[in-house]
Image (cartoon, helix red, strand yellow):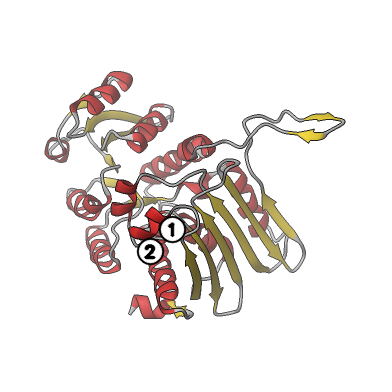
Amino acid sequence: MTVRFAILGAGRIGQTHARAIAATAGAKLVAIADPVAAAAQKVGKSYGCDIRTIDEIAASADVDAVAICTPTDTHADLIEQFARLGKSIFCEKPVDLSVARVSRCLEVVEQTGATLMVGFNRRFDPDFMAVKAAVDAGKVGDVEMVTIISRDPGAPPADYIKRSGGIFRDMTIHDFDVARWLLGEEVHSVMAAGSVLTDPEIGKLDDYDSVNVILQTASGRQAIISNSRRATYGYDQRIEVLGSKGMVAAGNTHESTLELADAKGYARPPLLNFFMQRYSAAYGNEIAAFIAAVADGGETPTTGRDGLMALVLAEAALASVKQGRSVLVSEILG
């Protein structure tokens, strides 16, 4: 079976998914939609696909699946629209910035029986997948503590921060998903601290640039997440799982494996400095997993519920910072 795709949104992430679809067996990109004509034309020319409006894609019989790469505030409406049309849906995170709106959207997905995958690309990074495989194989025994370090080289523009929903909903949300994935249990409580240490303008936007979060499950397992919007040495991405029998970890990815040693010590190339480079393989693996689920009729590896729960943890973390206390996940879910 060949899964015929349309991409909604021809920006940076839409172009990334177009490249992944074109490179994946069993997939064909048939259409791209974007209100910016030049962006749509760039994808259309590069991959030989049609340029259509979203309404035209909705009416297209030659589209089996859509990849939603539009602004966040359009995601839930588009998911519902294409679910009702019987299309399979891949949607970039988050489904929405409101827990209530996400819940309503997922009710439509369930009622229609649509296939929905939410894009949490870090689960598909080869090194992170190897960590998960080691945990699942019992190599470290019972999971006790998960540590996640995720630091950006620099903050995004102010206009982006204004519409992003803030660091917990935009940046840490990836780490919340990875934490749930590695802990193997749902999170019971969230304790977070947030500061503005790198740029006072971020504080003026009612956001934080430096946060730490402690997640705890009902059995006592913990995950510690450390985020910063400034890492002068590159894009810092590390995870570690400590268990009753040992530890497994995945470190950073450098521009190359070259290592130079001299009288001054050891020197290595810098870290990859952009998430598109660091997670290029993950984006390809992610799309391949979605295509396999659509072709086989199976469950997607990341679901609408995963999207909901990551957002719930983000809301709990924000409430914890604002209120200076540990917040139960049940308080956010209601």
Q: Nearer the viewer, residue 201 or 234?
A: 201
Q: Bin the neighbour count of mark 2 within 10 Å (Cα to Cα): few under 14, some 14-19, many 20 and up.
A: many
Q: Nearer the viewer, residue 310 or 56?
A: 310
- Pointer 2 with pointer 1, Cβ within 8 A: yes
**Residue designated by label 1:** 173
Q: Kindly identify which numbered label has been placed on residue 280.
A: none
Q: Is residue 90 visible?
A: no
Q: Residue at x 57, y 43 (%)?
A: 232
The percent position of residue 154, horizontal first and vertical second, equals 48, 44
Q: Residue furthest front?
A: 200
The C terminus is located in which quarter?
A: bottom left
On screen, residue 163 versus residue 275, left or right, reads left
**Residue designated by label 2:** 311
Mark 2 or mark 1: whose residue is earlier in sequence: 1
The percent position of residue 224, horizontal first and vertical second, equals 59, 65
The amino acid type of the residue labelled 2 equals: Leu
Q: CA distance from mark 2 to mark 1?
A: 7 Å
Q: Bin the neighbour count of mark 1 within 10 Å (Cα to Cα): few under 14, some 14-19, many 20 and up.
A: many
Q: Residue at x 44, y 72 (%)?
A: 321
On screen, residue 172 versus residue 9, left or right, reads right
